[in-house]
Image (spheres, grey):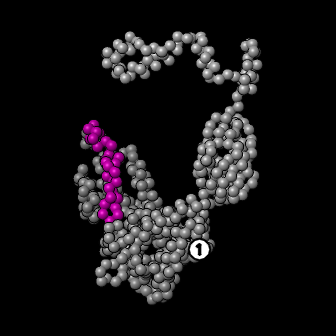
Amino acid sequence: MLTQVLDDLIRKQRPYYTPTETPIKGLNNQYWIIFKHRDADNLLHNIVSFFGLGEKHSTYKLLRIDLNHADIYEYVPKHENNIPNTTLIRTRNPQTLESFLDCINITTEPALLVGSFLEINIRKRRQFSLPTDQEKYDKFIRAYLERTKLYRRSTAYFGSGVLKFYQEPLQSMIKNEGEIRLLMDWQGFTNKQDVKELQKLHDPQYRSQYIKRTLHDFLQGLEDDAFTSTQILAELVRLDILKIKLVKMEGDRNIYHKKIGILTDHLDNSIQHNGSDNFTKNAHNGNAESIIFFYWDTELDHNAIIESIQEFDDEWFNSPLAFDLTADFLEETIKETQRRIEAKCPIITKINPHQLEAGQTQEIIITGNRLKPVQNIIVKDDTLIQFNLKKTTQKKLTLNITISPDHPPQTIDQLILTTDEQTYLTQLPQPLEISQPLTFPDFPEIEGFKQAIAQILDGNYGTPEDFLYYLAQQKPHLWQNLQLSAILDQLVDEGVLFEHQKSGAQQCQRI
């Protein structure tokens, strides 16, 4: 969205003003674009403007996009050509930069509001006391969660039951490709079933229910309240939406006890909540908890949020105490899934018949093992072969195979077998051999042609040795062994051939 807005702002300034460089990211979530008038370097235009014969335009114009409020500020230099350089724009706050500039227009950009925290009309609050403010807190936090692009969460304890309370905003986060990074103590699971649920995902039989579920099915299940909290946890982890790292404290320190949440929208605006609440069901609606919020558009709060983000990211990416549970979990899951796939892979031991002819429909029998789940068979990248399953058992498939008349002669050594769970590329023990039937024109002007072809097709023909004997009779000199050759001797003398290459060259000459 931001890229589109920046492009639109540049387009609206044309053709009179063009950007001098790409948009510049400044402090406090500000973007700047510096424009230069197209006639600024036109000497004739400058002379005309000097004599008052043309309209005077500022050489430079600057736009500031304030993502904290979705406002667009338009400036011209107070003194012609005196504009802040790129370094100043990157390192100075807007108030300092405005000492060089005159603001000529301020507008609000509606496109920046869509899907951002700026769209929320709920009154901001500094503090909530739970459970007294439970209803107001739920409404407040859900409004922000459904517009969150990244949720950083530090907690001592975690229980999946809390995810049940956030099913609606989780749907929005998933649709917006949002992400939750949970940094928690390594002993912080309050529900043993959560750990078991994650462990079960290593079981191929149990994991198959997740593999078959599409993202659409998962979103619909959240809407219908169809999943247990542990199922939501496992699905979020599997989809890589919820990433968990466990912190194992060293020495005599007890537990990782931070309780901070930082919610960030697509404009990079953030709110932060600090308090006594863990990321658990009890903390949400059972315990007496106090929660304090900080906001991006207050300078003191903004600085505190930036520091918290830096501290969290440093622990997430660089701390030797944080263990990447998600990566290990997914790696092990992939291995177990692959083992399950291989364990269920259909095995083909024989295809009868394996010699087939283009333009024909034939019945074939495939024998092997684990064949009953097979629902469909195809040849990769080949639409000229159609399989029609007639009967399936665990050890035998009976089917018709139809081969297009246009199919070229070919050997096929792999088939793609599809079950209701998986698609398998299966190597054949004996390749399918597809041949094209021979067709010949009559050539009536050639006496005896049809009769000769009929004899050949009936098998009445000689051997290759017969043909060689005929050649020997016609050209006996071709079979003489040329032991000496003045040409070859000359080539050896000239260094074109080595001595040991001479005999091979003699054979080539004879042939």
Q: Where is residue 339 in the image (x, y as percent from the top left)?
A: 54, 62
Q: In this view, does 328 lie above or below 10?
A: below
The residue that appears at 26% across and 62% down in the rendered structure is 92
Amino acid beneath label 1:
Phe
* Residue 320 can be seen in this image: yes
Residue range in magenta is 18-46
Which of these two is toward me, 284 or 297? Answer: 284
Q: In this view, does 251 lie above or below 207?
A: below
Residue 490 falls left or right of residue 131? left
The residue that appears at 64% across and 34% down in the rendered structure is 409
- Residues packed near mark 1 inside 10 Å, few (<14), some (14 to 19) or many (20 plus): some
Query: Would you identify the image quadrant in which residue 484 lies?
Result: top left
Q: What element carries label 1?
A: loop
* Residue 48 can be seen in this image: no
Q: Position of residue 19 (x, y in %)?
A: 34, 48
The residue that appears at 41% across and 49% down in the rendered structure is 11
Q: In this view, does 462 lie above or below 44?
A: above
Q: Position of residue 108 (x, y in %)?
A: 42, 62
Which of these two is toward me, 119 or 44? Answer: 119
From the image, which quarter does the N terminus lie in? bottom left
Q: Does the magenta stretch include residue 415?
A: no
Q: Mark 1 points at which residue?
A: 227
